[in-house]
Amino acid sequence: MSTENSHADDTDVIVVGGGNAGFAAAHAAALRGRRVVLLEKGGADHAGGNSYYTAGATRIAHGGLADLADIVEPDSRHENADVPPYSEADYAADLERVTGGRNDPELTRVLAAESADTVRWLHRLGMRYRLMYERQAYRLADGTWRFWGGLHVGNVDGGVGLIADHTRIARELGTDVRYGCVVTDLVTEADRVVGVRGRRGGEPFEQCAESIVLAAGGFEANALLRREHLGAGWQHAVVRGTPHNTGEMIDAALRIGAARGGDWSSAHSVQWDGRFPDNESNRTLTNRLTRQSYPVGIIVNTEGRRFVDEGADYRNYTYAKYGKAILEQPGSIAFQIFDASLRPLLRAEEYDMPGISVESADTLEELALRLGVNVAGFVATVKSFNDSIDTGRAFEPAVKDARRADTTPPKSNWASPIETPPFFGYPVTCGITFTFGGLKADTHGRVLSTRGGPIAGLYVCGEMLGGLFSGNYPGGSGLAAGMVFGRRAGALA
């Protein structure tokens, strides 16, 4: 696999962007005997797009553990694992539910129907998968590992392993991966896209091909575009993933007449360590800076007030929208609160990471002082919460237990009193993952023009493909969509 050639030469397929979706498209095209050049904006040591920063969680439809046994790594815990089936109908229903029905039905149908087959295809090529015990299961008193929330499979070694596997497969298939290529323009002849232009090492280059696949991510790393499209305050969000997704290729496609797709006013954003000194685009800690055990605790702002229903649903269906809720709080910061009885339930990879921002104290008053939270407001909030819990129901974090706290706002599930010292507070801010608006395409990734028909020679996949998500999304469906529609684009390009 060459990484040096940057002169103008012809090839069959150019893929712009070396993340999960781009590699899936490259593999599919290469397997058809196409000559593929993949142009990655980052250098070799900063490549992989947002995919590198993920936990590798991939939502697929499946029939339970027996149905997954052929693709996941062996693990002694499998003997005691309870992995409920997750059907294509469940998948589609979850997408429709969490987006409020704003998801494209045809894209949704394809994603749900082809998610499992696409993962099996990648596994045959050499991608490694595992059951995500530490992220998606709780161990019950009888020793059973009970999985929840429809998201059970992830890459070995997370996003780092995902990109390492993709890169190795690309090398084996003969794909020419070129790093440090900043693509800025699409080259057209008549009504067809025939190449790209950009810079590499400060020098201009032009590359021509029969087909161009755009997989260069959204505009989440561009503060000006966030402010323009997402609204006031979004310029202050922390970029949790790659700094390279700044929207140039979306703009390049729009300039030649591509239609916009999806919801340009919303984004995937999460609760992110709010006081860690290096909490932006951290390639060492990557996803460990997320704080996603919040459903078992409570979240307060600097006034000591709760502002979301932490137990509205499984974490997989709320985490991508609660970053926005925190951005809207005073100072764009909030605090996850747990007591000693809840602390053992928190994800070790996130809450035991080196240098984590946390305060602890033996009293609620002292904890509030250490966090910089209004003491009286915080103590009153905790008392109101504790007093309103439905103690007639058992606390069961692996299922929706309907153990409710009937306060304002209510907590619908997993309400457990904050009463056993020491108490813990974790500062969190808004970490943006990717924007939901992008280009409009058909189910094969063919970019559609503002006139309605496909733009010849131009395809899109990954976060640049708009239409699947709006306001929220089911965890793990982003990587799955990148694989499914990347494969589809590469099968035609």
Image: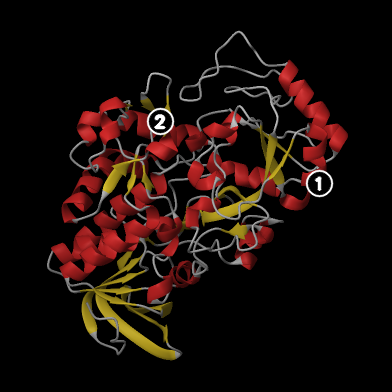
- At horizontal 73% and vertical 33% (from top left) the residue drawn is 306
Residue 381, horizontal then vertical, whole percent? 78, 28
Figure quadrant of the N terminus: bottom left
| Circle number at residue 218 | none
How many C-alpha atoms fall within 10 Å of the one at disc 2: few (<14), some, or many (≥20)?
some
Q: Nearer the viewer, residue 159 or 118?
A: 159
Q: For this view, does 331 lie left or right of residue 290?
A: right
Specify the farthest residue to the top.
392
**Amino acid under disc 1:** Gly
Q: Nearer the viewer, residue 59 or 183?
A: 59
Q: Nearer the viewer, residue 103 or 42?
A: 42
Residue 62 in view in this figure: no
Specify the farthest residue to the left.
33
Instruction: State the scheme by which the image is colored.
Output: secondary structure
Residue 40 in view in this figure: yes
Mark 1 secondary-structure assignment: loop
| Circle number at residue 93 | 2
Residue 137, horizontal then vertical, whole percent? 41, 32
Residue 485, horizontal then vertical, whole percent? 31, 53
Figure quadrant of the C terminus: bottom left
- At horizontal 34% and vertical 86% (from top left) the residue drawn is 206
| Residue assigned mark 1 | 372
- At horizontal 70% and vertical 33% (from top left) the residue drawn is 422
